[in-house]
Image (cartoon, rainbow, N blue to C red):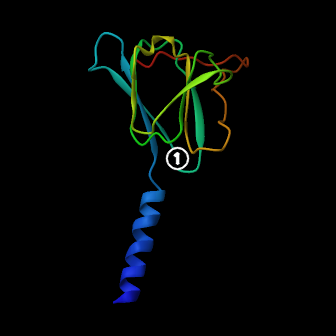
């Protein structure tokens, strides 16, 4: 019985640790329009959101979430909780989320080396 409980606990903890980090960006005027961003366990990523009409941002097991006014996830930031929401997010030009304590990969860049800032809507 004891071995079964230990095995069950190990399986449950590995499933819990393997959960993706998720962040939702909701449209400024139409909350039915939103984008989900994902990152794999153990990673941290940066997305440029300058061209997204972001009304609010919501973490859904987002890990360590940081909101930046810069487009490259650098400089001053506002942190929000893993499952928190921030309203009036039009000022946010990039977001970093995922595992705490590691640097993000930096924002995506186009072939010329400029920060890629898509409009996902």
Residue 20 vs residue 81, the one in the foreground: 81
Compared with 48, 104 (above or below) is: below
Question: Where, quadrant-wise, is the N terminus in this rendering?
Answer: bottom left
Q: Is residue 37 left or right of residue 74?
A: left
Q: Quadrant of residue 116?
A: top right
Residue 10: where, in percent of width, then height? 45, 73
Residue 37: where, in percent of width, then height? 45, 33
* SS under mark 1: loop
Residue, x 70% and y 21% (percent of image)? Answer: 111
Residue 66: where, in percent of width, then height? 55, 29
Q: Seen from this angle, which residue lies furthest right?
A: 113
Residue, x 63% and y 25% (percent of image)? Answer: 73
Compared with 64, 56 (above or below) is: above
Residue 115 vs residue 76, the one in the foreground: 76
Q: Quadrant of residue 68?
A: top right
Residue, x 42% and y 58% (percent of image)? Answer: 16
Question: Where, quadrant-wise, is the C terminus in this rendering?
Answer: top left
**Circle 1 residue:** 40
Residue 41: where, in percent of width, then height? 53, 50
Residue 25 vs residue 1, the one in the foreground: 1
Q: Is residue 67 left or right of residue 1?
A: right
Neighbor class of circle 1 (other Cα within 10 Å; few <14, some 14-19, many 20+) is: some
């Amino acid at each position: 019985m004891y071995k079964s409980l230990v095995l069950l606990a190990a399986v449950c903890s590995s499933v819990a640790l393997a959960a993706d980090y998720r962040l939702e960006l909701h449209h400024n005027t139409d909350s039915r329009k939103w984008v989900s961003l994902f990152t794999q366990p153990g990673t941290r990523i940066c997305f440029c959101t300058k061209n997204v009409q972001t009304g609010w941002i919501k973490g859904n097991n987002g890990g360590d979430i940081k909101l930046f006014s810069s487009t490259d996830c650098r400089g001053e930031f506002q942190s929000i909780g893993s499952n928190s929401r921030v309203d009036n997010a039009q000022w946010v030009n990039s977001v970093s989320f995922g595992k705490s304590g590691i640097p993000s990969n930096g924002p995506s860049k186009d072939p010329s080396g400029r920060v890629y800032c898509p409009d996902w809507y």
